[in-house]
Each structure stands twice: as structure tokens, then as C-alpha cells.
Image: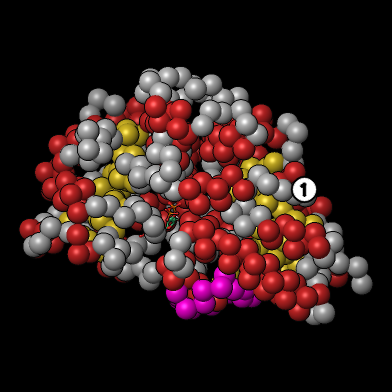
Amino acid sequence: MENEARTHVLIVPYPGQGHINPMHQFAKRIVSKGIKATLVVTKFISKSMHAETGKIGVEMISDGYDDGGFTAAVSVDAYLSRFTTVGSETLTEVIKKQQSSGYPVSCVIYDTFIPWALDVAHGFGIQAGAFFTQSCAVNNIYYQFHEGHLDTPESYAAADPTLPISIPGLPPLRPKDLPSFFYAPGYYGAYFKMLLNQYSNLKEADWIFVNTYKELEVEVVEYMAKDSPLRTIGPTLPSMYLDKRIPDDTDYKLNIYKPDSSLCMNWLNEKPNNSVVFVSFGSLAELGVEQMEELAYGLKQSNCYFLWVVRATTEEKLPSKFKEEVSEKGLIVRWSPQLEVLAHPALGCFVTHCGWNSTIEALSLGVPMVAMPQWTDQTTNAKFVQDVWGTGVRVSVDENGIVKREEIEHCIKQVLEGERSVEIRKNAIKWRNLAKEALGEGGSSEKNFDEFISKLTPTPE
Ligand code: UDP
């Protein structure tokens, strides 16, 4: 017990909401086992945190842009290269400080977006665990490309759109089911490089964790775990949510934006069960003016209640007077307590960009989806939502890449009340139950997590 108390895990997420959330939850789970965990965030992120993190310690590193974070950099390349240099130096300082404290670091769990953290940990002779915040299917696609087993993005962009692409552990995919980098080559060079870089030193990782559950992606998980220490530990949500119960200690403390919690929950409390469409595109995706207008009028035409998260930076793209026009049916907020919203009985469906966190949250809470992917891995997640897990429908885009209002209305109706809705709801319940089993006693994710905890080496006296 003495030894256990001296075990100390550092958790280092990439500074984005979709990375901080699952890794913060992972830290909470470690702390719940009586082990010390410290979350390491950038100075810029620490300024936007809204409260204390309870029993979890917080340490700061720098990405080299303490005042503006990512948006202060001239390019993605510039940001990532400075983060690699300054991040490595400042993480080294953090570890040195801990090594001379009563709780030297036993293990560093690092986000695969910042693989240099593994090198820093190993430089101290400390174990390093890689943490993937994407699905296992998506990991495998990038991995196969990294290993030279897939064609170039240019060739997929030019290929017949029905071309079936065969990848071990995955169903046949078409070019547009791959992450967007494969069919929009050239647009996001530095991002794509970062995603491929996740595998640069992965073979040296002592642990590899993925925020998914085995049952959801069984074939690809088994394929990838064959020759590696890959383990599924998701969903990283507190298991209470899966029973649609809300913990007293809700988890928006590390949110970059402050949620309009009571406004959202009071509004939802007045709505009938399964009646509300929740619309959110996560923390990064930016819809264009035309797409915002189509979405706005698609929601209005559906005649459903809707709760729409429009971040402050996007608000000016809302059609003028739209809020007034829909005040009877719609509530528009800048940020929501998403887990509470998804767990609310009034919720009928989720119009989502299919960021991996939003997707796995909806799957685990049994919420049917209208998948409206924007870029990166969202396109692959949308494919799985519709065709593999059967918990939603994916919107079609017109020749200019816009999802028209009629299509949005049609998809919402299909999910809420159309012929497919019965099957979709049945599947949603199935995946929620399997998520509960994975996290429950003896479940696949719980067993993997316990194995990690039991093998953590306590720091010798
Ligand atoms: N989120 C939230 N409130 C909102 C919108 C999003 O708490 O109004 C959370 C959501 O629950 C998820 C994260 O922000 O955990 C977004 O991650 P995701 O991977 O879905 O998208 P990203 O922001 O990375 O594109």
C-alpha cells in the first residue's frame, strides 16, 4: 500500500478539447485506484481551464505559444515544430522536478499526437504509454499508410469513387470513407504528417491504449493487438453516464469553453422524451456561411425541437434574425455540457461532425446520429456509424460539397421517425449495452485497465 501510494503517472494530452477530455477521464480512473496522477497541460490551455481538477495534480509545459496557443502560430508546421522543441524541454523540466519530489514519475502516458514525449520519458528510463484518441479503425488506416501498404492520397483522389479498398481488419472502404487527407490531398499537409508521425516511435511504447471498446471494433482490435501491446480502455466516460445518471461532480472543468449548463438542462427538462435534436460540431470544425444557412433552415423545416451549439467564433455566420425566428423550437448556445445533454431522456438524435469523442459518447449513451463529417477521421467514423454500427445515417453532399436543408430535414426524420429509425434505435441500445459490459466488472476495457494498474512499477523506497 505504501508502494502503491508512491506510484505516479503523468498524463500528457495534446492541447485540444478532444484530447484533454478522454485523457482527463483516464487520469481520474487512475486516481480512483489510489494512484497519483498528474495532468500536464500547456500554459495556454491552463489559462482557459474553469476550475480545480480535484485529486488530479496539474503541471504545465509550454508549446512555445503561451499567449495564443495554436492560433498564434503562423502555420501548423510552425506550431508543431516549436511544440516539439519547447514541449520536450519543458516536459523534461517537469519530470526533473517530480523526480526530486516525494513522488517520482513511474510512467508517462502521452498523446500519440506528441510522440516526442515518449523519447523524453525513455530518456529518464521511465515507462511510456501511447494513448490514441482516435478509433482503432482510423489508427489502422494511418498505420497501413505509414507502413507503405496504401496508395497515395493523389491516387485515391483520382480513383473511381466506388473503388473498394481492402485493409486488414476493416470492411471494404471507398476512397471517401478514408480520412479526408486521402481524398483531399495537399490541403492539410502538416496535419497529415502529424498523424503519420504517431507511428514514428510507437514500436518503443511500453503500453498502447485506445479510447474504444473491443466489441465495437473487434476484428481490427484483434489484428492490431496481435504483435503489439495495444489495449482498448474505452469508452473513457464515467460509467454512471451509461446508466443515464449524472454524477454530482460533472466534468467540464477542463473545458476550453464554459458550458451553458443550467440553460441547456432547464430547457431540455421541459421537452418530451426522444423529441430533441442536438447539434454540435465539436471544438474545431468551422462551417461556412452557406452551410450554416442550410443547416439552420434544415433544422427549422424539420419542425423538431433543437439544441444547437454554435461557438462564439461562428455566431456571426447564423442567418440574421434566425434566433428570433425559431425561439419557440430552438435553443442556440455557445457550449453545452455534452455528456449531460446526450444522457437526457428528451434527446432524440445527435447531428454530429463525428469527432471520435462525440461518436463514442453517442454510441455509449445509445443516441442515434445524423453523421455530418467535415474532415480528418470524421469521414471514416461516419461510414462506421451508418454502415457498420447501424446507429445513424450519413448525410449526402451536393456537387459543391454542401449538405442542403432538404437533406438535413430528411436525415433527421429518417433517424427520428422513418422506417430505419426502429433498427437504428435497436442498434443504439445494443452498442450502449456492450459499452456498459466493457466497463463493468470483468469487462474487456476494465480488465485491460486493471492489468495496467497491476503492472505499474511502484517507485522503490
Ligand atoms: N463538447 C462539449 N460541449 C459541447 C461540444 C463538445 O462538452 O458543446 C465535448 C464533447 O463531449 C467531446 C469534445 O468536446 O468530448 C469534442 O471532441 P470531439 O472528438 O467530438 O471533436 P473535436 O472537438 O476534437 O473536433
Image point 69% across, 41% down: which residue? 230
The residue closer to the viewer here, 146 or 189, is 189
Q: Is residue 231 magenta?
A: no
Tell me: is circle 1 under 8 Å from ligand 1: no
Quadrant the C terminus occupies: bottom right
User: Looking at the image, can residue 327 be seen?
Assistant: no
**Disc 1 designates what residue?**
204
* Residue 423 shown left or right of residue 36 in the figure: left
Residue 285, position in %: x, y? 35, 54
Query: Who is closer to the viewer here, 360 or 246?
Result: 360
Q: Is residue 52 magenta?
A: yes
Residue in the picture at 27% in, 52% down: 287
Magenta residues (range): 47-68
**Pick the front one: 138 or 176:** 176
Residue 165 vs residue 319: left or right? Answer: right
Quadrant of residue 284 in the image?
bottom left
Percent position of residue 47, x then y: 48, 78
The majority secondary structure of the magenta stretch comes to loop
Q: Residue at coordinates 29% horizontally, 30% vertically from top-left?
A: 421
Height in image: 72 above or below 116?
below
